[in-house]
């Protein structure tokens, strides 16, 4: 597939934009994608978005500002202040290091810190089955705690059957 911008090079970057249920797809080569990315950042950069969102909250007191400059990721050394400036985290461990701050930022951006969106039907069904197994395991622990062992054995066997069913579905897919 050729680049839709220069019509010369092979398209390696595929963008999909959805606005009000209207889907627009754009296929670009690497060079055109870089220039488009620079154009978009000039108009609306991720850094500006994150900085703006951080500024809409309560302003940082001098002590909080010092904390944001000293709070560091133990793995890559990035500070939360660096994240505020760039809008990018340094590594996967940053999510753990800055967890509470990121959660409050996500709540401000999305209104929630949980993903609520579409999932493939099969995935949704499997997730529900896993939740049921987890719920039954909690019930099993409760029965054991109450020393209701006869009921616990029946529930244990039911959980085992459900888990075997989930595992067999997993093997069929692979």
Image: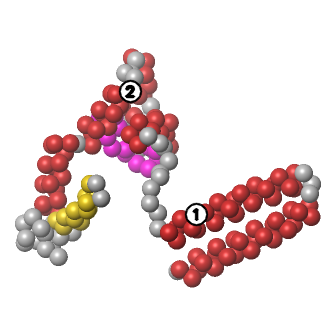
Report x, y in % for residue 148: 92, 57
Snapshot colouring = secondary structure
Q: The magenta stretch spans which residues?
A: 83-95
Q: Is residue 99 left or right of residue 42?
A: right
SS class of the residue under badge 1? helix
The image shows residue 42, relative to residue 84, as above or below, that is below
SS class of the residue under badge 2? loop
Quarter holding residue 43: top left
The image shows residue 94, relative to residue 127, as above or below, that is above
Q: Are marks 1 and 2 in contact (CB under 8 Å)?
A: no
Residue appearing at x 67%, y 76% in the figure: 165
Residue 164 seen in the figure: yes
Residue 97 seen in the figure: no
Q: Is residue 46 left or right of residue 78?
A: left
Give the labeled residue for mark 2.
57
Give the labeled residue for mark 1.
127
Report x, y in % for residue 13: 22, 65
């Amino acid at each position: 597939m050729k680049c839709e911008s220069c019509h010369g090079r092979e398209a390696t970057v595929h963008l999909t934009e959805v606005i009000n249920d209207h889907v627009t797809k754009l296929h670009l080569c690497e060079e055109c994608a870089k220039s488009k990315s620079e154009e978009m950042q000039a108009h609306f950069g991720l850094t500006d978005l994150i900085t703006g969102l951080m500024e809409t909250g309560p302003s940082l007191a001098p002590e909080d500002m010092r904390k944001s400059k000293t709070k560091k990721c133990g793995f890559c050394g990035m500070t939360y202040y660096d994240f505020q400036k760039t809008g990018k985290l340094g590594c996967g461990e940053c999510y753990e290091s800055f967890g509470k701050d990121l959660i409050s930022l996500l709540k401000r951006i999305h209104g929630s810190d949980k993903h609520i969106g579409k999932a493939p039907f099969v995935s949704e069904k499997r997730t529900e089955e896993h939740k049921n197994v987890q719920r039954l395991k909690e019930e099993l622990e409760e029965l054991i705690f109450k020393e209701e062992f006869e009921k616990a054995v029946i529930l244990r066997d039911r959980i085992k059957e459900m888990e075997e069913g989930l595992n067999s579905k997993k093997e069929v897919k692979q």
